Image: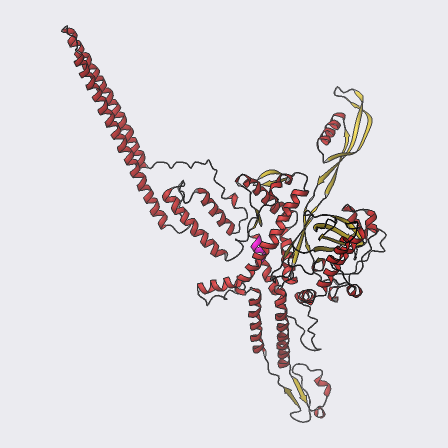
Amino acid sequence: MAEPQIFDDEMLEEPVASIEQVTETIENDEDKGITEEQLKQLLSSEIADAMTYIQGSEFIADDRETAYEYYRGVMDDLPSPEGRSRVTDRAVSTYINMMLPSLLRVFTAGKYIAIYEPNNEQNTKIAEVITHYVNECVFRKDNQGEMIIRDWAWNALVGKVGVVKSYYDESSKTEEETYEGLNDMEFADIVERVEANPELEVKAHTATSVQGPDPMGNTVNMTEHDLQVERTVNTSTIKLENIEWEEFIISRDAKNLEDAVLKSHRTYKRAGDLIEMGYDPDVVAHLPTYTNRAYQSASFDEYYRERNRADSPDPNLREVLVHEGIVKCDYDGTGVRDWYFVCGGGENVVEVLTMEHYDCQIVFADFCPEPIPNLFFGRCPADSLVEIQRANTVITRMMLDSGYLSMTPQREVVFDNLVNPEQLTNLSPGAPVYVTRANTIREMQVPFVGSQALNMLTHFETEAEKRTGVSKASMGLEPDALANQTATAANIAYSSSLGKVEMIARMWADNGMRKLFAGILKQLIKYQDFTRIIRMSGQEIAIDPRQWEMFKDVDVNIDTGLGTGNRDRDMAMINAIVGKQEAIIGQFGTSSPLVDLNKYSRALQDMAQTAGIKDPEQYFGEIPVDYQPPQKPPSAEQMEAQRKMQKDQQDFQVKMMGLQLKARELALKEAQVLADSGQQMSPADIQKLQLQYEKMLIDAELKQQKLALDAQAKMQELEVEARLEQYAIDKKAPSGQGIIPD
């Protein structure tokens, strides 16, 4: 990462008009609106003012350069005298590299970084598809998202502010297919396939008359076809790019990214690249070759060398300066300022390549680890570590010098008493030194100050941990760091050490990440004009963002919950929740209003996700709305009770049939007796006989109902006993390991 590029001194000394002054001048014109020259003046003025502010500020440019040099271990501001230790401390790189994994884990521990919320319940499935497509396909697959996040965090931790740019890159890939010796039927089939597929195009076709055998074996005249087919695959997608410090400029008075009158990416492109992007070749030809790539620090020479391709035989290889940004001005002369996307070329914007109303052509997303109210540029951990590294370097050098002098002390010598003075300059172990008088050579003892120096280094190490929020305990680098603390004290120390890192992650999520993913969705909806096939949950899905217009302003939630805090603590809490859920389901069943199977499934998914599994759905799925849980098979007692009830019912039915038969036999017998005697049954006798028969039927029905109620009560009693036994088993089982009934 390079430090800010600076203008020439002459350029910085020129008076710079503000954008308000330029706009006022334009508004006073009779014609209204902005001419091309006025537009160039306006852009040049605002860009120069922003560059002067950023590169002329000790708080911004100088701090960035120092932080970067210290990160690399280059400390030219702390020279070492000849013959003394030249060791340098690496506090900046050490603590920055310790913070990076914690920040990255916050956003990469879960399945998705950004989750798009549906507008209503009917759009839940579409929101899930959008979430999957943006996270997995666009962010991770198309842009190596983890590297984008890593570099973004590094730029912010070392250089105060990290900025990522997203834009829609229109591109395609061409493949050629060659066919030789086709007959008429084969040729017709391929042509039909080409006509049906807009990605295919016939580039060359050759027909040759030849003689060959027909199906009957006769020699006939035939036509052979040679065909060349070109396949053009649309590979356009959203591109993400980390912007280097010296390449991002913003208005001097900007308090935040949204309100800045100008925010621009100051970059370098080859002329040929601009032509491929669709810009007018004649306009590009007028752009001057940019060769002023001098940096404030000579230490950057090994990384950024002057790239002057002005003498190249291919003019498209020459390098030009381009500004791609967003500006707020009254371009149309209506008296009302509006936002415009602008692309200008040259240091002083000698050519305007494009100027149009802003509609998410590019999206900037910023991240400042330690923001200062009312300022765009805040502070970063590297700013606080520079002093620590400087102090540690001085102390370490003093300790090493002290040790060297203590172990190899200087000697006080009476020169005239030496037989051979050269012996002192070529000393070898055990070799004698000849003298003419005793006590000619005396060692000058230098006390070793290593213990005091180590105490000072420990002090500054503690100070570095306070400033960054990163400690050995939180990073797991020292196993006995918490050995002499109680569990409560250890948790307090751990949580305190992570507090600063978690705060940085939260600000990053709420500001930068949310901006980035909201912008990606808007760009997809506006610019992706083709269907893309992706895989989701093992199925192929056709993605067409043009159908997502209603979702362009949806809320974006950044998932940071599972990556922060103590993973063991989170797992223990989820285990406790799952244990309570299992106990409730075991007592009240899966249809309980307190805990149903869907809630239980979500808890299991969270458990798997906390354990680091990215796709917990492959283990625990959602319960369908119309799902009916299978009935639990009856126990042996229940089956026996049911069998006895069925037998009693059968016995009763047999008994009822016997009673009915007896009643019929009695009625026939009485009728026969009356017939033999020549008498007829009176109406009263008939009624009496009917009443007796109905009484028999009612008694039988009551007895049958009593048998059914007794059997039902027995079944309920057995079911309650089974639930009580299950509750006793769950109560004895460890938390989170209960048994869920089928």
**Magenta highlight range:** 103-107
Which residue is nearer to you in this view: 35 or 620?
A: 35
Residue 105 belongs to magenta span: yes
Where is 266 relative to 526, above or below?
Answer: below
The residue at 72%/92% (across/down) is 416
Task: Please indicate whether residue 483 sits to the left or right of residue 92 in the image.
Answer: left
Task: Please indicate whether residue 677 sits to the left or right of residue 579 in the image.
Answer: left
Q: Can you give x and y, in whole percent of width and height, for residue 341 in the image?
A: 72, 50
Q: Can you give x and y, in whole percent of width and height, for residue 35 in the image?
A: 80, 50
Which residue is nearer to you in this view: 565 or 285?
A: 285
Looking at the rendering, which quadrant does residue 53 occupy? bottom right
Asked if residue 345 can be seen in this view, the reply is no
Which residue is nearer to you in this view: 443 or 671?
A: 671
Q: Quadrant of the C terminus?
A: top left
Furthest-left residue in this view: 677
Q: Quadrant of the N terminus?
A: bottom right
Where is 115 relative to 12, above or below?
Answer: above
How many numbered discs sit on the rendered protein?
0
Assign the magenta stretch its main secondary structure.
helix
Furthest-bottom residue in this view: 437
Looking at the rendering, which quadrant does residue 428 occupy? bottom right
Which residue is nearer to you in this view: 163 or 617?
A: 163
Looking at the rendering, which quadrant does residue 182 occupy? top right
Where is 443 relative to 250, above or below?
Answer: below
